């Protein structure tokens, strides 16, 4: 079966179980989705797990994240799966700082027209929030580094993480 058909089939199966992801069949399909070689399918499975608060999939999510960190630019272009996994683990109140530390420090340079671009800024921001939520002992040093990040998206996330109760004015976002 051609690659695009296999991916479409995988995404179709994930879409079908979206209504009842907590069923036994749903859990099995989500686990298979998290083991997929297609990062878009992994991202979709992670999103469904997060929306359904499926804490029994935490181990599978952590394993998928680790797999996406091996040759990340080839395996997970644009950090699609890693971002969604980190978001889901944040939502599920995952409390092992190692994954979030790996994510907050991850830079993924990918080819774009005229050079390369870092596609992991959003991932760094999500992981910053995860470290803050779990009261990681060295979080302020990590956030200080993120405030100096070259990508505005990461700097804004660091500012939000430092002061999570205060909304960052929209005007600020225009100047970043």
Image: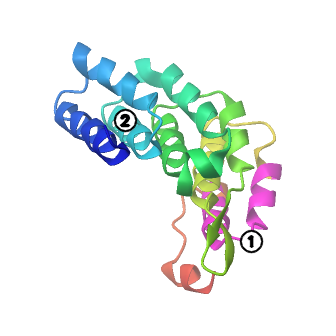
Residue 38: percent from the left, percent from the top? 44, 41
Residue appearing at x 49%, y 23% in the figure: 60
Residue appearing at x 65%, y 44% in the figure: 132
Residue 124: percent from the left, percent from the top? 65, 53
The residue lying toward the viewer, choosing from 6 and 62, is 6
Residue indicated by mark 1: 150
150 relative to 157, above or below: below
Q: Residues within 10 Å of mark 2 (few under 14, many from 20)?
A: many
User: Nearer the N terminus, badge 1 or badge 2?
Assistant: 2
**66 displayed left or right of 8:** right
The residue lying toward the viewer, choosing from 163 and 62, is 62
Magenta stretch: includes residue 28: no
60 relative to 14, above or below: above
Q: Main secondary structure of the magenta part?
A: helix
Q: Secondary structure at mark 2?
A: helix
140 relative to 60, above or below: below
Tell me which corner region of the image, top left, top right, bottom left or bottom right, holds residue 110: bottom right
Q: Residue furthest top?
A: 24
The N terminus - image quarter: top left
Residue 45: percent from the left, percent from the top? 37, 35
Q: Which mark is residue 45?
A: 2
Residue appearing at x 25%, y 38% in the figure: 9
Residue appearing at x 80%, y 59% in the figure: 144
The C terminus - image quarter: bottom right
Residue 165 visible at all: yes
Q: CA distance from mark 1 to mark 2?
A: 31 Å
From the image, state whether disc 1 or disc 2 is nearer to you. Answer: 2
The residue lying toward the viewer, choosing from 26 and 122, is 26
Q: Residue furthest front?
A: 1
């Amino acid at each position: 079966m051609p690659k695009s058909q296999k991916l479409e089939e995988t995404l179709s199966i994930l879409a079908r179980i979206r209504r009842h992801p907590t069923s036994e069949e749903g859990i099995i399909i989500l686990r298979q989705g998290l083991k997929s070689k297609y990062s878009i399918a992994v991202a979709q499975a992670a999103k469904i797990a997060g929306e359904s608060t499926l804490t029994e999939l935490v181990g599978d999510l952590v394993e998928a994240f680790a797999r996406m960190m091996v040759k990340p630019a080839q395996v997970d272009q644009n950090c699609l799966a890693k971002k969604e996994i980190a978001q889901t683990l944040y939502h599920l109140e995952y409390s092992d700082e190692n994954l979030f530390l790996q994510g907050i420090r991850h830079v993924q340079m990918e080819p774009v027209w005229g050079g390369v671009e870092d596609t992991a800024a959003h991932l760094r921001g999500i992981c910053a929030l995860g470290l803050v939520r779990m009261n990681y002992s060295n979080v302020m040093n990590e956030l200080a580094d993120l405030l100096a990040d070259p990508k505005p998206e990461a700097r804004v996330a660091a500012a939000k993480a430092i002061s999570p109760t205060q909304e960052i004015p929209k005007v600020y976002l225009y100047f970043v």
